[in-house]
Image: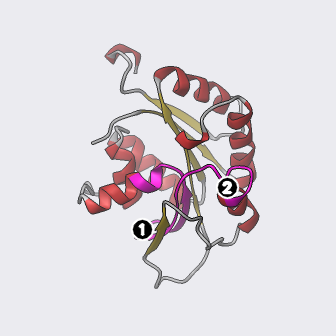
Amino acid sequence: MLKTNSVVALFNQHTQAEEAVKQLQQDGLDMKKLSIVGKDYHKDEDVMGYYSTGDRMKYWGKSGAFWGGLWGGMWGMLFGSAFFVIPGIGPLLMAGPIVAWIVGALEGAIVVGGMSAVGAGLYSIGIPEESVLQYETSLKAGKFMLVFHGTPDEVTRAKEILSDSAASDTQMHMIDAPVGAR
């Protein structure tokens, strides 16, 4: 498992998540350490998943302007993009390192009992199981999830920014911090 420090923020609307991404970028945080996941309302259940870590993904989904901005516009630096239909959650679009975490969990058969592939990807970086289950439930309910990972200082700075945003919930998961500071 590749454990890392992270902060996770949940948003009710993609416009709120978009504003938070802009603020993180304006504050100089490395956008290659940011991931975003959101539900897509495309109903084609035949699609099992599509991901790309090189070329930009061509599937835009219902919220085309939002995802198009992340994948090809000013945030085109979010590395990797994916569309997965996750059993129990539904169609999800995502961008950033989380794509590699999920693919790694799937390829390594790290899926933990009761978790989706998204959950297994989050769990593989050290996010506790109870938090993972909360995030999966939030995604199923249509929320957008931002995950920023990095050094303790970077994650603390990102949490401060995200705490001042329209996030409905923001949690830090520290691996490098002393046990009492988590």
Depth check, front residue: 39 or 32: 32
Indicate the position of residue 120 as horizontal and vertical percent values. Answer: 34, 53
Count the marks: 2
Q: CA distance from mark 1 to mark 2?
A: 25 Å
Q: Residue at x 53, y 40 (%)?
A: 33
**How many C-alpha atoms fall within 10 Å of the one at disc 1: few (<14), some, or many (≥20)?**
few
Residue denoted by label 2: 70
Q: Residue at x 41, y 41 (%)?
A: 131
Q: Residue at x 33, y 36 (%)?
A: 3
Q: Is residue 95 visible?
A: yes
**How many C-alpha atoms fall within 10 Å of the one at disc 2: few (<14), some, or many (≥20)?**
many
Query: Looking at the image, is mark 1 or mark 2 nearer the viewer?
Result: 2
155 horizontally vs 73: left or right: left
Question: Residue 5 lies in what quarter of the image?
Answer: top left
Looking at the rendering, the stretch of residues picked out in magenta corresponds to 72-100
Q: Look at label 2 and name its amino acid.
A: Leu
Indicate the position of residue 68 as horizontal and vertical percent values. Answer: 70, 63
For marks 1 and 2, the one nearer the N-term is 2
